[in-house]
Image (cartoon, rainbow, N blue to C red):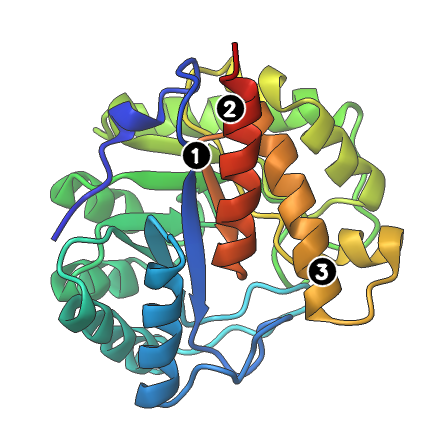
Amino acid sequence: MSSLPTSSLDPARKGRVKVMGILNVTPDSFSDGGLYLSEQEINNRIKEMISTGADIIDVGGESTRPFAESVSLDEELQRIIPAIKIIRLINDSIPISIDTTKAEVARQAIKAGATIVNDISALRFDPAMVEVVRENKVPVIIMHMQGTPGDMQNSPTYDDVIMDIKSFLTERISWAITQGISPSKIIIDPGLGFGKTVAHNLSILKNLPKLQKLGYPVIIGHSRKSFISKIIAPKGDEDRDTATAAISALCAAQNVSILRVHDVKKTVQAVRLAEAIQNAP
């Protein structure tokens, strides 16, 4: 299996953006909840993402949509471990990200074949998470979120959304390093849609270079988010994915390192075109 060489994600390096395909094995995720619950559905989804160009697969067993309810440790494990094992049967080298805030889920996922920890709580919700990351020497995604999934969209406010996110991420990065996490293993996520209004999300997308000045690879999770619907009034996922691809191209032009998306094919096409334009003489 393959881990993710974060040296290849240097934000100062103009190059190939990595596309992370989303596999939500949940009944209640905001966009694709309930679509990938059987072994055959999971198998088909994985093969589709890999064949259309996914560089990484992100597996989640607990919905993080606004106002989502938490699930038990056992339930989350029952959802994600079989999915990770199926991925490894199909492809033994593609990096797998485990989207969880629970240390034991991360630990068991890594044993099953996961190689990245994607913690929306920035290592805050479970005190043991930092130990799991440190002991396994895996990359970790540290995300900004105002509040929790249960209350984050209750009138989020900021003095300066970009500066506030930078301050939060700087503090969490410093803490993680003091706990023994190598700086080379850290990836940052401004958390689009996690305690943000439409205006906040747009400001983040406009000012990505300011976040990159922190010196860490940046991942953006914009796919099918509600702020898109509030701007273009899409009729379904097809429209949302087209809008997502447009944002993906914008992010690629700003040298974002990873894009986390539902529609891998559209995103790969968009970012490869953006990169070709960016690298033209």
Which residue in the protein does label 1 denote? Answer: 17
**Residue 30 occupies quadrant:** bottom right
Pointer 3 with pointer 2, Cβ within 8 A: no
As measured in the structure, the alpha-carbon distance from the residue carrying label 2 to the one carrying label 1 is: 7 Å
Q: Which residue is drawn at 69% across and 67% down?
A: 238
Pointer 2 with pointer 1, Cβ within 8 A: yes
| Image position of 48 (left or right of 137) | right
Which residue in the protein does label 2 denote? Answer: 255
| Image position of 153 (left or right of 273) | right
Q: Earlier in the sequence, mark 3 or mark 2?
A: 3
Indicate whether 256 appears above or below 125: above
Q: Which of marks 2 and 1 is nearer the N terminus?
A: 1
| Amino acid type shown at disc 2 | Asn
Indicate whether 119 appears above or below 219: below
Q: What element carries label 1?
A: loop
Of the numbered discs in the image, which one, if any, rests on residue 240?
3
| Amino acid type shown at disc 1 | Val
| Amino acid type shown at disc 3 | Arg
